[in-house]
Image (cartoon, rainbow, N blue to C red):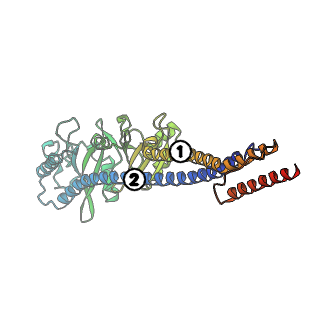
Amino acid sequence: MKYKSIKSRMVFMIGVSLITVLIVSAIIIISSVNKAQTDATNNAATEMAKQYANDFNSLIVKNDAIAATLQNYLNNNISKNRFEIVKVLKEVIEKNTGLLGTYATYEKNMFDGKDEEFKDDSKSGSNETGRVSPYWNKLKGTLEFEAVNEELSIVGDYYTIPQKTLKQVILEPYLYEGVMMTSFAYPLLKDGQFIGIVGADVSLDELNNEVNKIKVYDSGFGALVSNKGVFVGYKDKSYLGKESLSSIAKKLNAPELEKMASDIQAGIGGMIETDKLIEGTELLAFYQPVKKNNWGLILFIPKDEIFAAANSILNYIIIIFVLATLLITGLVYYISGKITEPINKAVDAIKEISTGDLSTRLAVESEDEIGVMSETFNKFTDGLRELVKILH
């Protein structure tokens, strides 16, 4: 490249070098800041998800403890009074307003051996066969009582799973008499032998109300899913108990949701990114296990909201580097002008000499190379004048 002046050469070479260093530094700093901000934001959201998961774990533990207390009471009950069981179950649901129902079901003749005497005695919680199967519930909004019929009392998972495993179970969401619910069921044992179950029901609406209280950033929201990924709490009530992460993943062709479902089933927390759940919105989903029942708590946060602060900082840094670049360019131009000014004067003086004007002189304003050049130029013109006088 040919330059028309030393100043142009200096401005270009120094400016390009400094701006290159500035740009490289900016890229490194922005990259580092972006990574640090991303890590910090992700860690904060993960901790938030853990906290909400712990909150729901406490809620699950509370409901489970109610069922466990009923188990302890009935396992140690020696009165063999059916009406007493009915009374206790009623007291429990009245004191715990979040419950949808309380119930107990015994194997035939394993409570007091008097099933024949209590056939169709619903007031004592005895069904048509005399089996002890009292059920207090708020399925229709108000507290009601019934003795569960033979067909329903011993066929559900709330009965068969504790019967087979002799262990407590928290059920996957299911539909009972038009209401989506989950149950906390415990086995009743006598000398290690299974004699029945006792438990408590919780409506998905009750859990969903708690989930919908979650507010993250401007429009982030929460979800609660069972171990199999079935929605227990979500902003769209039509999902509750009917849709799962896997079913949604298939409908939306979203393998990332399937991965989240697999992690939750394995009790693993994590984070995925999806733009399929809400059209036109990139969401980050942070999920953590609810340990008591191996469910999963999910926080869905719009990506632009979670990184708004980080992006603001990055934009601020970019503005600073742009202004710095302009300032450096201006300084290089100014300094180059100061350096080349005496050189330009020397060039002008030489041009004047070439026209025969030997009176031209340069001001000696420094002791550096420019000053030496000016002084030497003046001596040179002085010598030329003396030579001209001699020749004339």
Q: Which mark is residue 44?
A: 2
> How far is mark 1 from mark 2, CA to CA?
32 Å
Position of residue 123 relative to residue 77, above or below, is above
Question: Label 1 neighbourhood size at 10 Å, few (<14), some (14-19), many (20+)?
Answer: few
Q: Nearer the viewer, residue 136 or 369?
A: 369
Residue at image position (44%, 46%) is 285
Residue nearest the observer in this picture, 146 or 15: 15
Q: Quadrant of residue 150?
A: top left
Mark 2 neighbour class, 10 Å CA radius: few under 14, some 14 to 19, many 20 or more? few
Tell me the element at label 2. Answer: helix
Q: Are marks 1 and 2 in contact (CB under 8 Å)?
A: no
Question: Which residue is pictured at 35% across the width and 37% down the height?
Answer: 235
Residue 185 or 369: which is nearer the viewer?
369
* Residue 161 picture location, percent across and down: 34, 53
Numbered-mark total? 2
Q: Which amino acid, by three-letter code, is at mark 2?
A: Ala
| Residue in the picture at 53% in, 44% down | 323
